[in-house]
């Protein structure tokens, strides 16, 4: 704008007048915060809205040379430059008013991209505008408007930054799962003349590994796979721990076509080490990706089952993300991406447990040869720490040690005896008849192998596991006396170990037949091995204390400690459990080295067929209480007791 004045002589301006005039000229040349409704702000706002919507039809564009650009071409290039971020346009806003110099206006904006994982990438840019004919402001389009380092043909890409997965720790604070050497065993088809013969030799070698590989390596389809594969391919057969591979290295190393690759994988100390309790860590599976597309990506390591699955979010950590500019070289080939933003991954947090490596190894070893579903739980008496939770090979990944719901059989006579002693119904020396059979409301109860002891001290009835003596005494417990006593030992409690557990359900308020069955661990009473190990520890300790497994993060609602058990009663039960080993059904444990072993055998019918029975043994030695369970194990003396002996001898 030009200023004009009437022609007449003016006085010489003062310094103040010159300053005022200069301010007026500046204001005319560079306007900040222009208030014109058709000013640059309006065009910028239209562009920002169109960037997000993809519709730029209301915005005029020119390139840096001043040539006009169609809006649809700008919209297409904007999408191309956004690359992998195009589906989630940024949040955009003006951060100040325009600065105008002649016909060029510059408006500052804020660009905020929402990246995977709730990460925000924000930066400032400037939109340049040119005032054209009719005072219309047109946007000067250039790739640098999206990001200062972008050029035509570039595109933004994302790279997932995987966090370091934290470890599950043992009681000593050492990682249970840690990088350990493995060997990938494969075959190159072009070097194999007789695939069937090779498969037969490999099968024999794999069967020689001790302890046996679980599940067994199936090479039955190897000949077909070799025929169908690329002749120079690496056809993988199995991945073995280094210690297993070394057992058969000399047998397989020189077989035709064999190839071997050594690497590290996160593994527990042994193949079976607390396997069902710990769970596994594997590459993300199809159902993981389908259920949680926002959480997992291909190649991620994901916890499945057990502690690894339950605490996967904590252990896995939070992935980071990097934004890169992808561009091609003069020859059209991709160049290395230029990183323009990075959000570091957050490492996982470790999970600390009470598991003791030596005790767990002893428990796993004790069950190793048992083909039936089985479990062994060990609890430290002094503080309730779960030292071991083992499940035999037949459990197929199920944590029977914590979650089985099965009748306890005669191991429950420990609870029945405590209840009878608390009610002064008997003493350890009270004579209680042990006939061959005892009938309650028409139902006949009998002893294992139909034995009879006649009138003997109650301690002998207990040590020899006389069913008829206990069924005769059942009315003295009353309709709910067994359940009340069981609760003093922690059964049916609300335990919080940081993992799923079943604490038992004790029969109560049943008729005479049900009461008689419950007194010998039958009827509707069901427990888990952990529940019985906890009850056994309560007897050894003199009061209930909830078993504990996960220490950090600490469970929020652990059960409180129980009252002190009646001294006379619990002392008598301890004495009778020692007699089970010295003169009763568990005499095979009498010569186990170390402190004195106390215990109780149990054979539990689980249906209407007396031949169908589970086998149990519960007991303690020193500061370790434990429970052994064998599904369909038959007589406890031939299945559960030998497992207990192997465990105790290995635990020295």
Image (spheres, rainbow, N blue to C red):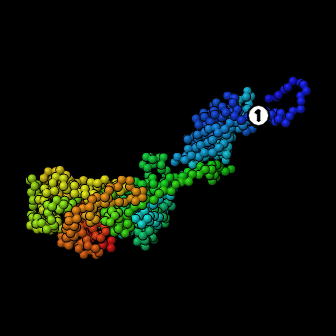
State the image coordinates of residue 531 (x, y, percent, origin top left). 28, 58
Q: Residue at x 29, y 75 (%)?
A: 594
Q: Viewed as shown, does residue 419 lie left or right of 528?
A: left
Q: Residue at x 16, y 50 (%)?
A: 510
Q: Secondary structure at mark 1?
A: helix
Residue 642 position by quadrant: bottom left
- Against 503, residue 26 (above or below) is above
Residue 254 position by quadrant: bottom left
Q: Residue at x 16, y 52 (%)?
A: 479
- Which quadrant of the figure contains the C terminus? bottom left
In depth, the one of 529 and 240 nearer the eye is 529
Residue 178 position by quadrant: bottom left
Q: Viewed as shown, does residue 364 lie left or right of 180?
A: left
In depth, the one of 577 and 192 nearer the eye is 577
- Residue topped by disc 1: 27
State the image coordinates of residue 273 (x, y, percent, origin top left). 37, 64
How many marks the image carries: the answer is 1
- Which quadrant of the figure contains the N terminus? top right
């Amino acid at each position: 704008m030009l200023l004009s004045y009437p022609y007449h002589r003016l006085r010489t301006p003062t310094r103040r007048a010159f300053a005022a005039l200069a301010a007026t000229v500046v204001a005319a040349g560079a306007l900040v915060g222009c208030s014109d409704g058709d000013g640059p702000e309006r065009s910028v706002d239209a562009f920002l809205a169109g960037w997000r919507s993809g519709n730029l039809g209301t915005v005029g564009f020119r390139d840096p040379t001043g040539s006009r650009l169609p809006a649809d071409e700008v919209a297409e290039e904007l999408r191309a430059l956004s690359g992998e971020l195009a589906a989630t346009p940024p949040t955009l806003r003006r951060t100040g008013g325009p600065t105008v110099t002649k016909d060029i206006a510059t408006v500052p904006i804020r660009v905020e991209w929402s990246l995977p994982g709730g990460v925000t990438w924000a930066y400032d840019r400037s939109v340049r505008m040119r005032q054209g004919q009719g005072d219309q402001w047109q946007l000067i389009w250039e790739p640098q408007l999206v990001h200062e380092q972008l050029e035509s043909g570039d595109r933004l890409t994302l790279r997932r930054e995987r966090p370091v997965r934290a470890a599950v720790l043992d009681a000593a604070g050492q990682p249970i799962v840690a990088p350990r050497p493995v060997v990938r065993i494969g075959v190159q088809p072009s070097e194999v003349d007789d695939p069937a013969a090779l498969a037969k030799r490999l099968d024999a070698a794999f069967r020689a590994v001790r302890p046996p590989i679980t599940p067994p390596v199936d090479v039955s389809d190897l000949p077909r796979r070799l025929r169908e594969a690329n002749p120079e391919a690496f056809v993988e057969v199995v991945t073995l721990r280094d210690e297993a591979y070394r057992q058969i290295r000399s047998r397989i190393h020189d077989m035709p076509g064999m190839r071997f690759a050594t690497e590290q994988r996160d593994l527990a100390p042994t193949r079976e080490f607390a396997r069902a309790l710990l769970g596994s860590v594997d590459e993300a599976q199809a159902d993981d990706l389908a259920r949680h597309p926002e959480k997992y990506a291909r190649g991620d390591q994901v916890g499945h089952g057990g502690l690894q699955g339950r605490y996967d979010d904590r252990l896995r950590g939070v992935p980071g993300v990097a934004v890169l500019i992808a561009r091609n070289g003069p020859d059209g080939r991709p160049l290395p991406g230029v990183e323009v933003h990075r959000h570091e991954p957050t490492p996982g947090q470790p999970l600390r447990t009470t598991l003791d490596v030596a005790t767990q190894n002893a428990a796993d070893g004790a069950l190793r040869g048992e083909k039936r579903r089985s479990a062994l739980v060990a609890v430290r008496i002094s503080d309730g720490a779960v030292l071991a939770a083992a499940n035999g090979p037949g459990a197929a990944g199920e944590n029977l040690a914590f979650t089985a719901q099965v009748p306890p059989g005669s191991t429950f006579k420990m609870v029945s005896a405590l209840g009878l002693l608390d009610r002064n119904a008997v003493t350890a020396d009270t004579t209680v008849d042990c006939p061959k059979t005892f009938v309650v409301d028409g139902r006949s109860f009998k002893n294992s192998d139909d034995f009879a002891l006649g009138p003997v001290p109650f301690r002998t009835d207990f040590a020899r596991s006389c069913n008829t003596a206990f069924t005769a005494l059942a009315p003295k417990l009353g309709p709910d006396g067994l359940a009340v006593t069981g609760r003093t030992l922690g059964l049916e409690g609300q335990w919080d170990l940081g993992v799923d557990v079943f604490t038992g359900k004790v029969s109560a308020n049943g008729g005479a037949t049900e009461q008689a069955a419950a007194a010998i661990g039958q009827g509707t009473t069901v427990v888990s091995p952990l529940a019985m190990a906890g009850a056994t520890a309560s007897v050894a300790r003199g009061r209930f204390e909830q078993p504990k497994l996960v220490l950090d993060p600490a469970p929020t609602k652990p059960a409180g400690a129980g009252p002190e058990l009646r001294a006379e009663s619990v002392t008598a039960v301890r004495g009778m459990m020692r007699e089970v080993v010295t003169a009763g059904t568990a005499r095979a444990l009498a010569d186990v080295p170390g402190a004195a072993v106390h215990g109780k055998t149990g054979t539990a019918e689980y249906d209407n067929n007396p031949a169908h029975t589970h086998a149990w043994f519960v007991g303690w030695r020193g500061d370790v209480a434990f429970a052994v369970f064998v599904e369909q194990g038959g007589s406890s003396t031939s299945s559960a007791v030998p497992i207990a002996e192997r465990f105790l001898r290995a635990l020295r």
